[in-house]
Structures are given as C-alpha cells and as structure tokens.
Image: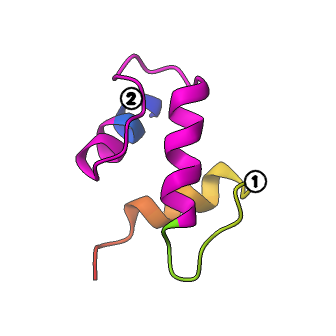
Amino acid sequence: MVRALQEELAARGLDPGGGDGRLGPRTRTAIAAFARGLEPPLPADAPYWRVLGALLEPAA
C-alpha cells in the first residue's frame, strides 16, 4: 500500500523519495505537502488515513 501511495504522490509532482514501499521521512514530507494543498488544507499532523482518502478521491 505504501508503494502505491508513493507512486500516486510522484504522479502528482511530489517527491516521496522513490517507490521502496517504506514510510520514511521523504514519503511523510510528501504526504504533508499534499495535505497542505487540499481545499481546505489538512493540518500537517492529519492522520494518514485522511490523506489516503483524499488521494483516492477522484480529481475534480
């Protein structure tokens, strides 16, 4: 699941640090950057499941 998340983040122009399947610091930073870009923005400490849900929603 983490690898799929990394691929989606990379496809959206964020750098998760590769597709190694590990939830490391670069992936966490990319998740936080994605969350800040949402309308309304999610806080940087938002639970990952909320960010995952936003990533999986169809683009408007």
- Residue type, numbered disc 2: Arg
Residue 24 part of the magenta segment: yes
Q: Is residue 52 visible?
A: no
- Residue type, numbered disc 1: Asp
Q: Which mark is residue 2?
A: none
Q: Magenta stretch?
A: 7-36
Q: Is residue 5 above or below residue 39?
A: above
Q: Residue at x 30, y 41 (%)?
A: 10
Sequence-wise, the earlier of marks 1 and 2 is 2
Q: Which mark is residue 3?
A: 2
Residue 56 part of the magenta segment: no
Q: Where is residue 20, by image quadrant? A: top left
Give the position of the C terminus as an image quadrant: bottom left
Q: Secondary structure at mark 1?
A: loop
> In the rendered view, does 23 fall on the left or right side of 12?
right
Q: Residue furthest top?
A: 20
